[in-house]
Image (cartoon, rainbow, N blue to C red):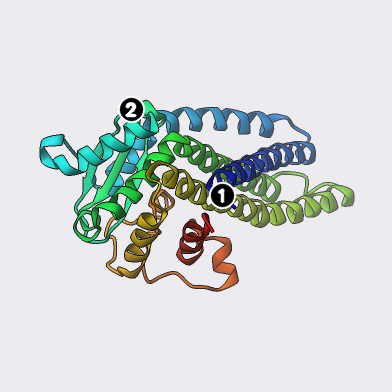
């Protein structure tokens, strides 16, 4: 499989997952509205989606940078890093993003920003100290690929969708459990018990399915960023070696957070990964070995 084919394949699969996500939310809203015999739930879901999407679109990058304790640097602070970013941006046809530094020993990096004009790349001091130029170029190209592919905006949309699913199912469960109708005739009592049972199933399965879809989309975007980044550098082994070095380093990231872990090029939770099948369902990143195999096998 060529890099171009891999990019097209991952793009199609990502949008297919996203379409499935939309169907899940619409179907969930319709089902709950039908069971509750009220359109309020559906309109509440729409209102929450719009409100949370607006807030996330404008402020998500600032929140992420604050959580990571990233500090803005200028060209005079690290001319070599800036030149590398500038050269890759020219190749990719992207505006120069802001560059942030995270004072952490673990080698890692992430990109954020609502669009290419407001792109941000953040790297740890450990990344700059432990990678050679070709490896660092591979990592920066990967992060620029996220910006160019507008992955951050897609990730924000998915996070909002997961939040809406959780809120809707939790609200329905509370309404079904505490709602009226239990003190009337026998038919009303049975109806309420059925609604409670359905609400309990939805409260467990709907957020679980939404989270699994979120993880699947995140993993696909990592594969896509790997492929797109290599198209910029024309040097797959540089990124492959960088991923090997980063994965071997078990230094913890003090600012690691569940809400932002999927943004990093490699999961910041070092030493906490397992290889069980259930864990793989909830991994925000594809296995490093699989990514390296794809990078080193694309031209064979």
Left or right of 125, for residue 97:
right
Left or right of 43, for residue 163:
left
Left or right of 287, for residue 211:
right
In which image quadrant can residue 82 be found?
A: top left
Q: Looking at this view, is 154 or 192 the one in front?
A: 154
Give coordinates of residue 77: x percent, y percent. Answer: 11, 40
Name which residue lies at 77% across and 50% down. 195
Q: Secondary structure at mark 2?
A: loop
Give coordinates of residue 87: x percent, y percent. Answer: 28, 36
Left or right of 4, for residue 127:
left
Q: Secondary structure at mark 1?
A: loop
Q: Looking at this view, is 240 or 189 the one in front?
A: 240
Q: Earlier in the sequence, mark 2 or mark 1?
A: 1
Crowdedness of circle 2 by 10 Å Cα count: few (<14), some, many (20+)?
Answer: some
Query: Is residue 71 visible from the viewing direction of this image?
Result: no
Crowdedness of circle 1 by 10 Å Cα count: few (<14), some, many (20+)?
Answer: few
Q: Quadrant of the C terminus?
A: bottom right
Name which residue lies at 22% across and 61% down. 130
In which image quadrant can residue 229 be found?
A: top left
Give coordinates of residue 163: x percent, y percent. Answer: 54, 43
Q: Looking at this view, is 292 or 29 the one in front?
A: 292
* Residue 2: assigned label: 1
Name which residue lies at 39% across and 36% down. 60
Give coordinates of residue 3: x percent, y percent. Answer: 53, 47
* Residue 95: assigned label: 2
Name which residue lies at 43% across and 47% down. 230
Query: Is residue 245 visible from the viewing direction of this image?
Result: yes
Q: Tell me how far mark 2 sits from mark 1, CA to CA.
A: 27 Å
């Amino acid at each position: 499989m060529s890099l171009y084919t891999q990019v097209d394949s991952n793009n199609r699969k990502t949008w297919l997952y996203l379409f499935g996500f939309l169907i899940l939310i619409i179907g969930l809203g319709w089902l709950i509205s039908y069971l509750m015999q009220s359109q309020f739930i559906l309109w509440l879901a729409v209102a929450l989606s719009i409100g949370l999407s607006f807030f996330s679109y404008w402020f998500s990058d600032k929140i992420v940078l604050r959580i990571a304790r990233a500090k803005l640097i200028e060209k005079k602070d690290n001319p070599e890093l800036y030149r590398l970013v500038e050269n890759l941006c020219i190749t990719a046809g992207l505006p120069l993003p802001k560059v942030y530094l995270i004072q952490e020993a673990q080698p890692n990096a992430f990109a954020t920003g609502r669009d290419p004009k407001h792109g941000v790349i953040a790297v740890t001091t450990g990344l700059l100290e432990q990678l050679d130029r070709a490896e660092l170029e591979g990592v920066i190209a990967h992060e620029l690929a996220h910006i160019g592919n507008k992955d951050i905006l897609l990730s924000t949309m998915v996070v909002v969708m997961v939040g809406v699913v959780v809120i809707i199912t939790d609200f329905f469960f509370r309404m079904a459990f505490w709602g009226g109708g239990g003190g009337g005739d026998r038919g009303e009592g049975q109806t309420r018990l059925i609604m409670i049972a359905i609400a309990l199933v939805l409260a467990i399965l709907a957020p679980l399915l939404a989270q699994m879809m979120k993880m699947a989309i995140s993993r696909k975007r990592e594969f896509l960023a790997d492929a797109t980044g290599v198209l910029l550098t024309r040097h797959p082994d540089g990124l492959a070696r960088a991923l090997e070095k980063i994965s071997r380093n078990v230094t913890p990231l003090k600012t690691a957070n569940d809400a932002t872990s999927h943004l990093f090029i490699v999961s910041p939770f070092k030493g906490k990964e397992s290889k069980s099948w259930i864990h793989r369902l909830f991994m925000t990143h594809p296995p490093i070995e699989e990514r390296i195999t794809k990078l080193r096998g694309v031209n064979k």
